[in-house]
Image (cartoon, coloured by chain):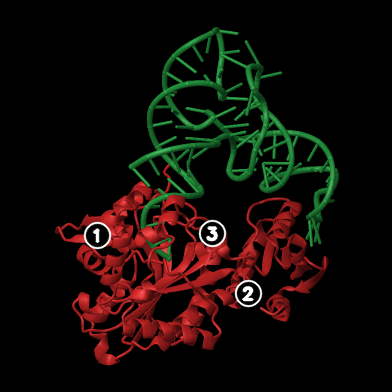
Chain colours: A red, B green
Amino acid sequence: MITSVKGFNDILPDQALKYRKVEEEARAVLEAFGFSEIRLPIAERLELFQRGIGASTDIVEKEMYTFQDRKGTLLALRPEGTAPVVRAYIEHGLYHRDPVAKLYYMGPMFRYERPQKGRTRQFYQIGAEVLGVEDPRLDAEILDMVTLLFDRLGIEDVELFINSLGCEVCRPSYRQALLEYLKGKEEGLCRDCKRRLGTNPLRVLDCKVEGCREVTARAPEIMGFLCNPCREHFEEVKGHLALLGVPYGIDPRMVRGLDYYTKTAFEMICKRLGAQNAVAAGGRYDRLVKDLGGPDTPGFGFAIGVERTVLLLKDREEEILPEAYIISLGREASSESLRLLKELRMEGIRTELSYGERSLKAHMRRANKLGVAHVLIIGEEELKKGTVVLKDMEKGIQEEIRRDRVVSILKGRVEAVGV
RNA sequence: GUGAGCGUAGCUCAAGGGCAGAGCAUUGGACUGUGGCUCCAAGGGUUGGGGGUUCGAGUCCCCUCGCUCACCCCA
């Protein structure tokens, strides 16, 4: 048996319905907030991610699917969507059209990681980016939007946490202070954290190991090191969130895995998710556009993990059921049933044929199992008389109607149900 | 990359050295052209794969593959 590739999962129809629900709701909210869709390639030049995400991040170092095309160009399957959006923004000079760009995208991303709950190698993200706005009102506006989206999806137990990561002015001094605090305390840290001291010391702060938590319990917090502009920005974001009535918490230890983030960072967490508990995350990236060769342009964006969101969705989405089900008995009636099928479909009535030469009972069982509302039976007798039996499956009553009246009668019934 | 747990029918799971089973699902029948409830029956398995121990292995041992969860990392 040929199976799918590890971490590349099939999304079967019942799940696909949920994905679609999330996507449709997201589209509605995003477009109400003034975003336009952008569709981008699934592969980019490797260099885009090395420069955008940061060459020493885990994503770039060991999680990307990279390959050469036949000409030898180094490509990567996109591990995230922000860098490609910014690339397109610069490449097409979108800032010439409008100083503010509000773009959203949805589609698969790829990271080579060990799959677990809420984590696959091909996974879907819905993301949005605002380029060209430095105003802290925007940060609050977007956080409000994300909150609203989960609300609209009926997911109530997500919690918003925010933090400020500072900027290129103040973050280094915090980093320095943290390193000094940790100096001499290395023994109490786990192996991973000892490594992190060299790579990304801020990460030590959100280590789950008990010993590390004890060590960092009294560590300095970034809030005390923010420069005036960053502090003011953060204060304003908090004020605006309160104004909008957006519930949030502050997590001074929150760190981002991508290098480009500055100032506001946020995560939306749900306890039901297991270890991979972030359903959405993002923040401000005021340097990225410039770093990728564009004009000095601030940015704010986020991505929603669709798999994780689907895991949180409560009710099973309603299946799309056929409205009419045609059963024919006998060879001549079977031709007539095909004609009727087409007529009904042309009128927009979802109709299915019952295939195979089986007993009427077998056909009826299947109609019942499918959950169709109306069954049309054409047998030899009906064929002779020019009629069709119409059975209402819910009421359990049936009537014999004229063949040439079937479409109009059914149309009336189906519309009456409110389709 | 590391660790743990689990692989038996389409699905959920029994059988823990001695005939591979149940429920659900599927198909047919009871009811010759009428669904749901009920009852009866049938089909469906190299017990993930390979090797070993044994008179005998789904069961014990080794290897391997896969899945799951966690670490890591992150949406």
- For the N terminus of chain A, the quadrant is top left
CB under 8 Å between discs 3 and 2: no
Q: Position of residue B66 (x, y in %)?
A: 44, 41
Q: Nearer the viewer, residue A241 or A356?
A: A241
Q: Residues within 10 Å of mark 1 (few under 14, many from 20)?
A: some
Q: Nearer the viewer, residue B72 or A195?
A: A195
3 or 2: mark nearer the eye:
3
Please name the residue shown 25% across and 75% down the image. Answer: A168
> Quick check: A397 left or right of A168?
right
Read off the residue under disc 2: A349
Mark 3 on the same chain as mark 1: yes
Q: Nearer the viewer, residue A385 or A353?
A: A353
1 or 2: mark nearer the eye:
1
Amino acid type at image mark 2:
Ile
Q: Position of residue A202 (x, y in %)?
A: 34, 63
Q: Nearer the viewer, residue A207 or A128?
A: A207
CB under 8 Å between discs 1 and 2: no
Amino acid type at image mark 1:
Ser
Position of residue A408 relative to residue A72, above or below, is below
What is the distance, in whole Å, between disc 1 and disc 2 at their CAs?
56 Å
**Secondary element at image label 2:** loop
Extreme-left residue of the structure:
A71
What is the distance, in whole Å, between disc 3 and disc 2 at their CAs?
40 Å
Q: In the rendered image, which quarter is residue A264 located in?
A: bottom left
